[in-house]
Structures are given as C-alpha cells and as structure tokens.
Amino acid sequence: MTATIRDVARACGVHVSTVSRTFSAPHLVNAATRSKVLAAADALGYRPNRAAQALTTGRTFNLGLIVADIANPFFPPLIKAAQAQARQRDYHVFVADTDEDPRAEEELVRTLAKQVDGILLCSPRLSNRAIERLAEDTPFVVVNRRIKGMPAVLMDVGQGAAQALDHLIGLGHRKVALVSGPSGSWTSDEMRRAAAETPGLDLVLLGPNQPTEEGGLAVAGDVAASGVTGVLAYNDLVALGLIEGLAGLGVTVPGEVSVIGFDDILPGRLNRPKLTTVTMPAAAAGRLAVDLLLQGEGALVTLETALIVRESTAAPRQA
Amino acid sequence: MTATIRDVARACGVHVSTVSRTFSAPHLVNAATRSKVLAAADALGYRPNRAAQALTTGRTFNLGLIVADIANPFFPPLIKAAQAQARQRDYHVFVADTDEDPRAEEELVRTLAKQVDGILLCSPRLSNRAIERLAEDTPFVVVNRRIKGMPAVLMDVGQGAAQALDHLIGLGHRKVALVSGPSGSWTSDEMRRAAAETPGLDLVLLGPNQPTEEGGLAVAGDVAASGVTGVLAYNDLVALGLIEGLAGLGVTVPGEVSVIGFDDILPGRLNRPKLTTVTMPAAAAGRLAVDLLLQGEGALVTLETALIVRESTAAPRQA
DNA sequence: GTGAAAGCGCTAACAA
DNA sequence: TTGTTAGCGCTTTCAC
C-alpha cells in the first residue's frame, strides 16, 4: 500500500540503491538523478521505513524517555522540551512511566533498549549498580543522578537546599524538618546531605515519603508532633499536601510552621499561602539530556537552582 | 552483541524457525522443545528485535500519542493512563507535542505513521477533512473530536457547559461571557453550541484565545469591558489567568464576576478562590482510546463530565 | 513437530 | 555515478 524504495526506483527508472543513496548520502548522486528521484518520491508520497532502516543500520532514530510519574507536574516540562529537541534532530521519543517502581523501571529499559538509540533516565529509582549494568547494552543519559562515568544532567539540589535552609535560619528557625522523598531518589539524598552539612540546625529527618500530595498529607501529623518550626519538603506536591494536612490539624503556615518546597510547579504559585520554593530547570535539563545523548559525549552538566521566597515562610513565632 | 534468534537456535540445536515459533505460536511446538528453547533464550538474554518483527509482520507494537501541549496539566493524566494501558498490551508509545500547531500535527502524523500500529490524536487542531485524509493510511482514534465514521472518545463537553451555564443562571447571572479556546478545537465549538442553546442568556463571545494562563490574562481587559457578571472559560488555565488579570484590573472574583473553568486540574483546586469547574475524565479517555485503537472497533465513546462548584462563582452583586 | 527457503524494506560494500 | 549483491533479524509458507 505505502510506497517503498522499489516503487520509487521503478517510477524513475533507476536502481533501488540510487534511491537509497538519494536519501542517505545525497552528495554521492548526480544532481539531475537526485531531483528526478526526489520528484518521484514526492509524487508517490514515499517515506523511508524506519524499521527497515533500523535493521540495516542499527540506528532507530528513536529515544526512550523514562520518568517516575508523568502526572507529577515536575516532569511534563522536561518531557516537552526533550521531545521538541529530539524532534529537531529527527528523532521520535518513547515516553514511559514507572509509577515510582524500580522493577518497572528496569523492565522498561530492557524492553525499550533494542528499539532506541539511547535512553534518558529521569530521576531514576533504580540503584547505581543496576543502572550501570543496564548501561552496558544501551547508551544512557541520567537526569538527577550521579553515576561515575555516565553522562548526566544534574540540578544543583544541594545548593538549592542549602539556600532554602539558610533562608530558614536567617528567619530565626533552629529546629527544622527535612521531609524526604522516595528511597532511591538522588535528589532526596542530596537534600539530606546538604542539610547535614548546614551548621546551626536542629534537624529532624522525616521519611521516606511518597513524592505526592498524599505523601505530604500523610506526614503532617509527624511534622506537627516533631515540634519543628520550619520544613524543607522533597517537592512542591509534598509541601502542598503538608500545608493542607497541617491546616487540618489547626497548624497555620507560615504562622506556626514555615514550609519550603522544591520544583516551582504552577500549583505552588497559586496556592495560598504562595509557596516558597526552589526552582528546578526541568525544561533545560530535558533539552540538554537529549543533546548529550545524541552527541554521545561523556559530559556531566550541572544546572543551577534558585530559591524563590514567597509566602509560606516567615519568622518563627516567639516561644 | 545482543543475542539473536540464531544464537538461541544454535545454543539448543534447533532451527531458527522453531525458535521463532516458540515465541509467536508456542502451541505449534513440542512442549519439551519449547522449554529447551525458552531456557536457552533466557540464558542468553534474548529479546526479539521489534524492528525485524515489524518488517515481516507489519505490526510494530508501537502507538503514537499526539497532544497539543504536553505541559498543559490537562494532558499528563491522559498520557499516563494511555501509556499504562498500552504497556499492559505490550505496546510502547511515542508521545509527541504539536505546540498547538496544526501543521506540526500533520507532519507528526506523517512521520509517525509507518512506525506505529495506530495513532491517538488528542484534542486535534487539524480540520476534520485533514484528519480523514490522514486516516486513510493509519488507524486512528481521536479524543475530543467527532468525525463521522472514526473511532472516538469524547468528553461530554456540551453537557458540562450546559450545567455550568445553568449554575450561573441559577445564581442570577444574565449577561455571561464565553471565553473560547483555540480555533480548530472541538471542545471549544461544543461549548459555544451549548451556550447558544441555553435560553435566558445574554451571551458575549470572546475568542479565540490561547488555551493557557497567558490567554486568560490577555482577555481579562475584554471581559471587564464587556460588562458581564459571569464567565465560562475554555479551560482552567484560562480561567486562572483570567482571574489573575481581573484582579490586576481591580475586579474581584467572585464578588464582581463569577468564573467557571474546565478540566479540574490541580492548580484550580489550590487557587484562591478555588475554581468552580467541570471535571473531565482524562485518564479514562486515555485508557479507552488505547483499547479502541487496539481492538480496532469503530466505537464512539462518550464520557460524562460534571460541574464542581467551588468558590469562584457567586450571585451577582445587585446593580 | 520441525526444517528449508523466501522475503519484509532498506543499506552498504563492491564492481562496473 | 550507478548497478549488483548480500544480508540485517525475523516470520511464514511449504515440505518433510
């Protein structure tokens, strides 16, 4: 039904290999022949069959993009940017969602591996070892995970967390909770590391938690019971859930407790109080990760983050 | 490097066709042979090469999912659900974003067509005619678009809009604006149709508008100038932008103007005032669309929508 | 129940 | 510059 290289060849009286060359190495074919072929191809609506190309060349012109949760507002801008960048380079992208499950992540990588030229693993939940093993078969770029020798795009979470904590300290908070994210999350570990290195803090670690509103809601009781006056949450969703949970417990934000999120997603900007948070350059990360993958360079890119002070933080109430 | 069917065949002393059958038609092969083959395949980490399978069978086990804007919060739940459903049926999904551009949409369909077994076109901006033409080459399911003879998943936008308008009327509003969406949007047309059929309304049509916060912000002036006391917006993003724009103009919501959105996205629930809106079953639509596509049935599914009254609507101030 | 052989659409030496 | 040929990994008749 759909035209093949052979139809085009027949239509303009050349051999199939000439048609093939016209597309894959145009400089090797006579200009006159080339335009004849192009015209015929156009008339027939010919488009090369990517599966066949992949079979001979080993290149699929496909990329895999794996995220923990498509519906988490942090990811869509990253997906969008990666997809756009890939498109520019004539690549298509498979998007898949692991539902925060490391086993699903691994299986996904395995089934995708042969169909793509490389995989973007975003905020993986798999262990470094597991990722390294998988990377033996497929080019990888990881986002928000540091693995020796593997190309990565990192967001400087440690620096953002430090800034957030300094902000809290500057406001006069001493006893502060870190509401961490899922286990296996590099960003969560980075936040913890940054917190541990911040002097002058009476730190309470609460977690692991689900990286969702529900996770925040669920931990509200513990936060209230802990007696902290400030909280740094794993992400905005958790922060939002926490604020809601705290409100349910009669604890006001930022009156009694200050809360800082991470990611700077839209809902945080609209919430009352507007969320103080750390912006994450998700779109830039998506774009760069695609570039790294396609250029096959072993680079490590670290993107800056920045604290945005809004309304969910204030000086602690005097005891 | 990666094991092929031939490696497996050699490893257990059978012919390649037997190995092939073991996977594609297991009942045609002796149980003993089958388990021998399976064991060898497992040991070698064999996975069939999808490109090669596609070449012979014509089935790719890939799906295309095209949306207007991945970053619009309405779509991620749909994408997530579609992806999960596809995965269950052993399909992978290409996700692509048209940036609200009909030309990009068409080109995307064309380049994707040969690599997939079908395409899910969500809230397309292309004309019916253009879609029908494209559908000659590739199985399609459209979401939120009604095209004669084409499988579709629809959300009952007309009904939702009618409910929203009735709510406004019940509150005492007479002069109401419909802030429509992008041209080419079926949902926008449905809303307009429903509005036109609602009696007792002094209707002002404002649009087309971009389906984003910016779109809402930009139209705020016109809304204020129009003298309406109620607004039905194309979606929550527009409604949110509009409320913000109105606030900038010193117009309070719902004090002076009531605003209703569409989609029920998270930011709307967190906004102050919390947005009165119409829920759209995006996840269900994604799931069903995949089912329709893979079952190849020519069905038309219409999903219900429902008004959720929150805080952005109230009785009009007495003149 | 299994093997042999042809071929899916394309590319990549090699020859002419 | 173009044609010839073999083959990518797999499925699918057709024989045995």
Image: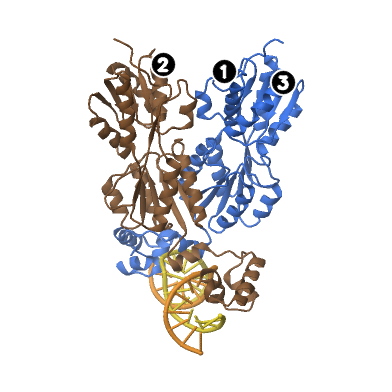
Chain colours: A brown, B blue, C orange, D yellow
Judging by the rendered image, the residue that carries numbered circle 2 is A247
Figure check: B296 above or below A14: above
Looking at the rendered structure, the kind of residue marked 2 is Ala
Q: Nearer the viewer, mark 2 or mark 3?
A: 3
Q: Residues within 10 Å of mark 2 (few under 14, many from 20)?
A: few
Observer-nearest of A222 and A79: A79
- Tag 2 and tag 3 share a subunit: no
Figure check: A306 above or below B34: above
Task: Give yes or no for contact between labels 2 and 3 (Cβ–Cβ under 8 Å).
Answer: no
- Tag 2 and tag 1 share a subunit: no
- Tag 1 and tag 3 share a subunit: yes
Looking at the rendered structure, the kind of residue marked 1 is Glu
Q: Residues within 10 Å of mark 3 (few under 14, many from 20)?
A: some
Tag 1's secondary structure?
loop
Which dot marks residue B227?
A: 3
Which chain is home to disc 2?
Answer: A
Q: Position of residue B43 (x, y in %)?
A: 29, 59
Which chain is home to disc 3?
Answer: B
Judging by the rendered image, the residue that carries numbered circle 1 is B311
| Residue B28 seen in the current view | yes
Figure check: B47 above or below B244: below
Q: Nearer the viewer, mark 1 or mark 3?
A: 3
Tag 3's secondary structure?
loop
Position of the C terminus of chain B by quadrant: top right
Residue at mark 2 to residue at mark 1: CA–CA distance: 18 Å
